[in-house]
Image (cartoon, rainbow, N blue to C red):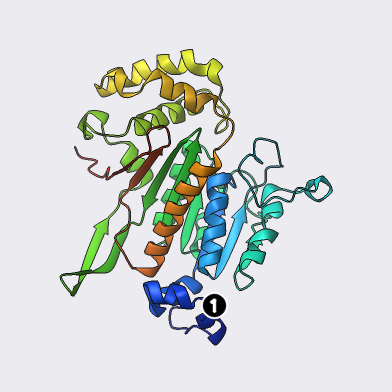
Amino acid sequence: MGKECEELTEQETAIYDRQIRVWGVDAQRRLSKSHIFVSGLKGTVVEFCKNIVLAGVGSLTLNDDRFVTEELLSANFLVPSDQNVTRGKSLAELCCESPKDFNPMVSVSVNLPLIFLGDLASFDVEFFQKFDAVVISCCSLLTKKSVNAKCRKLPRRVAFYHVECRDSCGEIFVDLQNYSYSKKKNEETIECQLHYPSFEEATEVPWRSLPKRMSKLYFAMRVIERFEVLEKRNPRDTSADDLPNVLKLRKELCEAQCINESQIPDSLLERLLASKHEFPPVCAIVGGVLVQEVIKAISGKGDPLKNFFFFDATDGKVIIEDISNVNS
Protein backbone atom coordinates (compact mmCIF):
# COMPACT_ATOMS: atom_id res chain seq x y z
CA MET A 1 0.00 0.00 0.00
CA GLY A 2 1.94 2.97 -1.27
CA LYS A 3 0.52 5.68 1.03
CA GLU A 4 -0.40 3.87 4.23
CA CYS A 5 0.89 6.67 6.42
CA GLU A 6 -1.68 9.14 5.11
CA GLU A 7 -4.73 9.78 7.28
CA LEU A 8 -8.33 9.97 6.13
CA THR A 9 -9.58 13.44 5.34
CA GLU A 10 -12.56 14.88 7.20
CA GLN A 11 -14.68 14.38 4.08
CA GLU A 12 -13.66 10.72 3.79
CA THR A 13 -14.36 10.16 7.48
CA ALA A 14 -17.83 11.64 7.12
CA ILE A 15 -18.76 9.77 3.93
CA TYR A 16 -17.42 6.39 5.07
CA ASP A 17 -18.64 6.68 8.67
CA ARG A 18 -20.84 3.57 8.51
CA GLN A 19 -18.06 1.47 6.98
CA ILE A 20 -15.57 2.70 9.56
CA ARG A 21 -17.95 1.50 12.27
CA VAL A 22 -17.96 -1.97 10.66
CA TRP A 23 -14.30 -2.59 9.83
CA GLY A 24 -12.44 0.27 11.54
CA VAL A 25 -10.64 3.44 10.51
CA ASP A 26 -7.38 1.68 9.69
CA ALA A 27 -9.09 -0.66 7.23
CA GLN A 28 -10.90 2.24 5.57
CA ARG A 29 -7.64 4.20 5.34
CA ARG A 30 -5.94 1.31 3.57
CA LEU A 31 -8.88 0.98 1.21
CA SER A 32 -8.98 4.70 0.44
CA LYS A 33 -5.31 4.66 -0.57
CA SER A 34 -5.53 1.51 -2.69
CA HIS A 35 -5.41 1.21 -6.48
CA ILE A 36 -7.39 -1.47 -8.33
CA PHE A 37 -7.04 -2.66 -11.94
CA VAL A 38 -9.86 -4.55 -13.67
CA SER A 39 -9.95 -6.10 -17.13
CA GLY A 40 -12.88 -7.74 -18.92
CA LEU A 41 -16.03 -5.74 -18.23
CA LYS A 42 -18.70 -8.41 -18.22
CA GLY A 43 -21.58 -8.42 -15.75
CA THR A 44 -19.75 -9.89 -12.76
CA VAL A 45 -16.86 -7.45 -13.06
CA VAL A 46 -19.29 -4.56 -13.52
CA GLU A 47 -20.96 -5.55 -10.23
CA PHE A 48 -17.53 -5.62 -8.64
CA CYS A 49 -16.68 -2.16 -10.01
CA LYS A 50 -19.87 -0.66 -8.60
CA ASN A 51 -19.35 -2.10 -5.14
CA ILE A 52 -15.62 -1.40 -4.85
CA VAL A 53 -16.21 2.24 -5.83
CA LEU A 54 -18.99 2.56 -3.25
CA ALA A 55 -16.62 1.08 -0.66
CA GLY A 56 -14.22 3.95 -1.31
CA VAL A 57 -11.04 2.74 -2.98
CA GLY A 58 -8.47 5.32 -4.03
CA SER A 59 -8.63 4.59 -7.74
CA LEU A 60 -10.08 2.14 -10.24
CA THR A 61 -8.50 1.57 -13.66
CA LEU A 62 -10.62 -0.11 -16.37
CA ASN A 63 -9.32 -2.13 -19.29
CA ASP A 64 -11.47 -3.55 -22.12
CA ASP A 65 -10.98 -2.50 -25.74
CA ARG A 66 -13.95 -4.45 -27.12
CA PHE A 67 -16.84 -2.63 -28.74
CA VAL A 68 -20.38 -2.98 -27.44
CA THR A 69 -22.46 -5.95 -28.59
CA GLU A 70 -25.86 -7.25 -27.51
CA GLU A 71 -24.14 -10.05 -25.61
CA LEU A 72 -21.96 -7.61 -23.66
CA LEU A 73 -25.01 -5.55 -22.73
CA SER A 74 -26.89 -8.49 -21.21
CA ALA A 75 -25.69 -7.77 -17.65
CA ASN A 76 -23.78 -4.49 -17.99
CA PHE A 77 -25.64 -1.57 -16.41
CA LEU A 78 -22.72 0.86 -16.73
CA VAL A 79 -23.03 1.34 -20.51
CA PRO A 80 -25.24 4.29 -21.59
CA SER A 81 -28.37 3.31 -23.54
CA ASP A 82 -27.88 6.12 -26.10
CA GLN A 83 -26.39 4.57 -29.25
CA ASN A 84 -25.01 7.95 -30.30
CA VAL A 85 -22.86 7.91 -27.17
CA THR A 86 -21.67 4.31 -27.55
CA ARG A 87 -20.70 4.47 -31.22
CA GLY A 88 -16.94 4.10 -31.80
CA LYS A 89 -15.99 3.82 -28.12
CA SER A 90 -14.46 0.89 -26.28
CA LEU A 91 -16.31 -0.88 -23.49
CA ALA A 92 -13.88 0.54 -20.91
CA GLU A 93 -14.51 4.09 -22.09
CA LEU A 94 -18.27 3.60 -21.93
CA CYS A 95 -18.14 2.10 -18.43
CA CYS A 96 -15.93 4.85 -17.01
CA GLU A 97 -18.43 7.62 -16.27
CA SER A 98 -21.15 5.86 -14.25
CA PRO A 99 -18.88 4.74 -11.35
CA LYS A 100 -17.87 8.37 -10.86
CA ASP A 101 -21.51 9.15 -10.10
CA PHE A 102 -21.62 6.36 -7.49
CA ASN A 103 -18.75 7.94 -5.56
CA PRO A 104 -17.12 11.17 -6.83
CA MET A 105 -14.25 10.72 -4.36
CA VAL A 106 -12.91 7.71 -6.26
CA SER A 107 -10.70 8.26 -9.31
CA VAL A 108 -12.02 6.11 -12.18
CA SER A 109 -9.98 6.01 -15.38
CA VAL A 110 -9.45 4.00 -18.54
CA ASN A 111 -6.19 2.30 -19.28
CA LEU A 112 -5.13 3.46 -22.74
CA PRO A 113 -2.43 0.96 -23.69
CA LEU A 114 -0.36 3.27 -25.86
CA ILE A 115 2.75 1.28 -25.07
CA PHE A 116 0.94 -1.93 -24.09
CA LEU A 117 -0.68 -2.81 -27.38
CA GLY A 118 -2.38 -6.15 -27.90
CA ASP A 119 -3.66 -8.76 -25.49
CA LEU A 120 -3.51 -8.25 -21.74
CA ALA A 121 -0.88 -11.00 -21.63
CA SER A 122 1.49 -8.65 -23.49
CA PHE A 123 1.46 -6.02 -20.71
CA ASP A 124 4.86 -6.06 -19.00
CA VAL A 125 5.56 -6.66 -15.33
CA GLU A 126 6.11 -2.99 -14.52
CA PHE A 127 2.60 -2.11 -15.67
CA PHE A 128 1.06 -3.97 -12.71
CA GLN A 129 3.33 -2.58 -9.99
CA LYS A 130 1.18 0.52 -9.42
CA PHE A 131 -1.80 -1.56 -8.28
CA ASP A 132 -2.74 -3.25 -5.01
CA ALA A 133 -5.18 -5.70 -6.62
CA VAL A 134 -5.62 -6.99 -10.18
CA VAL A 135 -8.98 -8.46 -11.24
CA ILE A 136 -9.30 -10.09 -14.66
CA SER A 137 -12.08 -11.85 -16.56
CA CYS A 138 -13.00 -12.92 -20.11
CA CYS A 139 -9.45 -13.92 -20.97
CA SER A 140 -7.56 -16.93 -22.26
CA LEU A 141 -5.82 -19.57 -20.18
CA LEU A 142 -2.47 -18.13 -21.29
CA THR A 143 -3.48 -14.66 -20.12
CA LYS A 144 -4.60 -15.91 -16.69
CA LYS A 145 -1.27 -17.62 -16.14
CA SER A 146 0.76 -14.75 -17.59
CA VAL A 147 -0.84 -11.91 -15.60
CA ASN A 148 -0.77 -13.95 -12.38
CA ALA A 149 2.92 -14.74 -12.90
CA LYS A 150 3.74 -11.07 -13.49
CA CYS A 151 1.95 -10.02 -10.29
CA ARG A 152 4.07 -12.55 -8.39
CA LYS A 153 7.34 -11.13 -9.81
CA LEU A 154 6.81 -7.70 -8.30
CA PRO A 155 8.78 -6.63 -5.19
CA ARG A 156 5.59 -6.05 -3.20
CA ARG A 157 2.48 -8.19 -2.98
CA VAL A 158 -0.19 -7.53 -5.60
CA ALA A 159 -3.39 -9.50 -5.00
CA PHE A 160 -4.58 -11.39 -8.10
CA TYR A 161 -8.15 -12.47 -8.85
CA HIS A 162 -9.71 -14.20 -11.82
CA VAL A 163 -13.49 -14.39 -12.09
CA GLU A 164 -15.64 -16.13 -14.70
CA CYS A 165 -19.39 -16.51 -15.05
CA ARG A 166 -20.93 -18.77 -17.67
CA ASP A 167 -24.65 -19.44 -17.80
CA SER A 168 -25.79 -19.56 -14.15
CA CYS A 169 -22.38 -20.64 -12.82
CA GLY A 170 -19.53 -18.62 -11.37
CA GLU A 171 -15.90 -19.29 -10.43
CA ILE A 172 -13.41 -17.10 -8.56
CA PHE A 173 -9.69 -17.80 -8.17
CA VAL A 174 -7.63 -15.93 -5.56
CA ASP A 175 -3.84 -15.59 -5.23
CA LEU A 176 -2.59 -13.49 -2.31
CA GLN A 177 0.89 -15.07 -2.41
CA ASN A 178 2.25 -14.95 1.18
CA TYR A 179 -0.49 -13.20 3.11
CA SER A 180 -0.58 -12.16 6.76
CA TYR A 181 -3.65 -10.93 8.58
CA SER A 182 -5.11 -10.70 12.06
CA LYS A 183 -8.35 -11.99 13.52
CA LYS A 184 -9.99 -12.24 16.91
CA LYS A 185 -10.27 -15.60 18.66
CA ASN A 186 -11.52 -15.98 22.23
CA GLU A 187 -11.23 -12.22 22.78
CA GLU A 188 -7.60 -12.27 21.63
CA THR A 189 -6.13 -11.00 18.38
CA ILE A 190 -4.06 -13.64 16.63
CA GLU A 191 -1.79 -13.31 13.63
CA CYS A 192 -2.40 -15.69 10.73
CA GLN A 193 -0.41 -16.45 7.61
CA LEU A 194 -1.50 -18.15 4.41
CA HIS A 195 0.58 -19.32 1.46
CA TYR A 196 -1.19 -19.28 -1.91
CA PRO A 197 -0.20 -21.10 -5.10
CA SER A 198 -0.37 -19.43 -8.49
CA PHE A 199 -3.20 -20.20 -10.90
CA GLU A 200 -0.83 -22.38 -12.92
CA GLU A 201 0.29 -24.34 -9.86
CA ALA A 202 -3.27 -24.80 -8.60
CA THR A 203 -4.62 -26.07 -11.91
CA GLU A 204 -1.72 -28.51 -12.31
CA VAL A 205 -2.68 -30.45 -9.18
CA PRO A 206 -3.59 -33.99 -10.36
CA TRP A 207 -7.36 -34.41 -10.49
CA ARG A 208 -7.21 -37.82 -8.80
CA SER A 209 -5.72 -36.18 -5.69
CA LEU A 210 -8.53 -33.62 -5.30
CA PRO A 211 -11.27 -34.11 -2.68
CA LYS A 212 -14.14 -36.38 -3.70
CA ARG A 213 -16.61 -33.54 -3.06
CA MET A 214 -14.73 -31.31 -5.52
CA SER A 215 -17.09 -29.09 -7.50
CA LYS A 216 -17.92 -30.50 -10.91
CA LEU A 217 -17.72 -26.92 -12.13
CA TYR A 218 -13.96 -26.93 -11.48
CA PHE A 219 -13.40 -29.84 -13.85
CA ALA A 220 -15.80 -28.49 -16.49
CA MET A 221 -14.08 -25.10 -16.55
CA ARG A 222 -10.67 -26.72 -17.00
CA VAL A 223 -11.96 -28.84 -19.92
CA ILE A 224 -13.40 -25.78 -21.68
CA GLU A 225 -10.23 -23.76 -21.07
CA ARG A 226 -8.24 -26.56 -22.69
CA PHE A 227 -10.68 -26.78 -25.60
CA GLU A 228 -10.38 -23.05 -26.29
CA VAL A 229 -6.59 -23.34 -26.32
CA LEU A 230 -6.53 -26.33 -28.67
CA GLU A 231 -9.07 -24.79 -31.03
CA LYS A 232 -7.47 -21.31 -30.81
CA ARG A 233 -10.80 -19.85 -29.74
CA ASN A 234 -11.35 -16.56 -28.00
CA PRO A 235 -12.75 -16.89 -24.47
CA ARG A 236 -16.47 -17.78 -24.53
CA ASP A 237 -16.37 -18.24 -28.32
CA THR A 238 -18.16 -21.57 -28.11
CA SER A 239 -21.62 -22.98 -28.76
CA ALA A 240 -23.65 -26.16 -28.25
CA ASP A 241 -22.31 -27.36 -31.60
CA ASP A 242 -18.92 -27.83 -29.93
CA LEU A 243 -20.26 -30.38 -27.46
CA PRO A 244 -19.20 -33.56 -29.37
CA ASN A 245 -15.59 -32.38 -29.59
CA VAL A 246 -15.58 -31.22 -25.99
CA LEU A 247 -16.91 -34.61 -24.86
CA LYS A 248 -14.09 -36.27 -26.76
CA LEU A 249 -11.57 -34.00 -25.01
CA ARG A 250 -13.23 -34.72 -21.66
CA LYS A 251 -12.75 -38.44 -22.23
CA GLU A 252 -9.05 -37.95 -23.01
CA LEU A 253 -8.45 -35.73 -19.98
CA CYS A 254 -10.36 -37.98 -17.59
CA GLU A 255 -8.39 -41.02 -18.77
CA ALA A 256 -5.11 -39.14 -18.35
CA GLN A 257 -6.14 -37.87 -14.90
CA CYS A 258 -7.62 -41.20 -13.78
CA ILE A 259 -11.07 -39.91 -12.84
CA ASN A 260 -14.55 -40.94 -13.94
CA GLU A 261 -16.21 -38.92 -16.70
CA SER A 262 -19.30 -38.65 -14.50
CA GLN A 263 -17.43 -35.96 -12.59
CA ILE A 264 -18.04 -33.69 -15.60
CA PRO A 265 -21.70 -34.13 -16.66
CA ASP A 266 -22.69 -33.65 -20.29
CA SER A 267 -25.46 -31.29 -19.24
CA LEU A 268 -23.05 -29.00 -17.37
CA LEU A 269 -20.65 -28.79 -20.29
CA GLU A 270 -23.50 -28.05 -22.68
CA ARG A 271 -24.76 -25.22 -20.46
CA LEU A 272 -21.32 -23.64 -20.23
CA LEU A 273 -20.63 -23.97 -23.95
CA ALA A 274 -23.97 -22.67 -25.19
CA SER A 275 -24.42 -19.69 -22.86
CA LYS A 276 -23.88 -16.30 -24.48
CA HIS A 277 -25.54 -14.20 -21.79
CA GLU A 278 -24.84 -13.75 -18.11
CA PHE A 279 -27.59 -13.86 -15.50
CA PRO A 280 -27.68 -10.59 -13.51
CA PRO A 281 -28.60 -12.30 -10.20
CA VAL A 282 -25.59 -14.63 -10.53
CA CYS A 283 -23.37 -11.67 -11.44
CA ALA A 284 -24.59 -9.85 -8.32
CA ILE A 285 -23.81 -12.83 -6.05
CA VAL A 286 -20.39 -13.63 -7.47
CA GLY A 287 -19.43 -9.98 -7.88
CA GLY A 288 -20.48 -9.33 -4.27
CA VAL A 289 -18.29 -12.16 -3.01
CA LEU A 290 -15.39 -10.88 -5.10
CA VAL A 291 -15.56 -7.34 -3.74
CA GLN A 292 -15.63 -8.62 -0.15
CA GLU A 293 -12.52 -10.69 -0.82
CA VAL A 294 -10.64 -7.71 -2.27
CA ILE A 295 -11.65 -5.57 0.72
CA LYS A 296 -10.38 -8.29 3.07
CA ALA A 297 -7.05 -8.52 1.25
CA ILE A 298 -6.49 -4.76 1.25
CA SER A 299 -7.68 -4.11 4.80
CA GLY A 300 -6.10 -7.18 6.41
CA LYS A 301 -9.40 -7.86 8.19
CA GLY A 302 -11.21 -11.20 8.08
CA ASP A 303 -10.42 -14.69 6.82
CA PRO A 304 -9.72 -14.50 3.07
CA LEU A 305 -10.94 -17.06 0.58
CA LYS A 306 -8.35 -19.72 -0.31
CA ASN A 307 -8.33 -20.23 -3.20
CA PHE A 308 -11.29 -21.32 -5.42
CA PHE A 309 -14.94 -20.28 -5.06
CA PHE A 310 -17.70 -22.01 -7.04
CA PHE A 311 -21.39 -21.15 -7.36
CA ASP A 312 -24.14 -22.82 -9.38
CA ALA A 313 -27.58 -21.19 -9.27
CA THR A 314 -29.31 -24.38 -10.42
CA ASP A 315 -28.83 -25.95 -6.98
CA GLY A 316 -27.82 -22.83 -5.04
CA LYS A 317 -24.65 -24.50 -3.76
CA VAL A 318 -21.47 -22.61 -2.88
CA ILE A 319 -18.21 -24.56 -2.61
CA ILE A 320 -14.91 -23.09 -1.45
CA GLU A 321 -11.91 -25.30 -2.13
CA ASP A 322 -8.22 -24.94 -1.28
CA ILE A 323 -6.27 -26.47 -4.17
CA SER A 324 -2.68 -25.95 -3.11
CA ASN A 325 -0.68 -29.14 -2.73
CA VAL A 326 1.11 -29.38 -6.08
CA ASN A 327 3.17 -32.31 -4.81
CA SER A 328 0.14 -34.53 -4.18
| 64 w.r.t. 277: above or below | below
Q: Is residue 166 left or right of residue 321?
A: right
In the rendering, at what x and y percent does residue 148 appear?
43, 49
In the rendering, at what x and y percent does residue 191 appear?
21, 69
Nearer-the-camera pick, 39 or 204: 39
The 10 Å Cα crowd at callout 1, few under 14, some 14 to 19, many 20 or more, is some
Residue 123 seen in the figure = no
Q: Secondary structure at mark 1?
A: helix
Residue drawn at x 21%, y 35% as measured from the top left: 211
Residue drawn at x 44%, y 23% as measured from the top left: 269
In the rendering, at what x and y percent does residue 48 appear?
52, 54
Q: Residue furthest right?
A: 84
Nearer-the-camera pick, 91 or 186: 186
Quadrant (top left, top right, bottom left, bottom right) of the C terminus: top left
Quadrant (top left, top right, bottom left, bottom right) of the N terminus: bottom left
Residue drawn at x 42%, y 24% as measured from the top left: 268
In the rendering, at what x and y percent does residue 169 appear?
45, 36
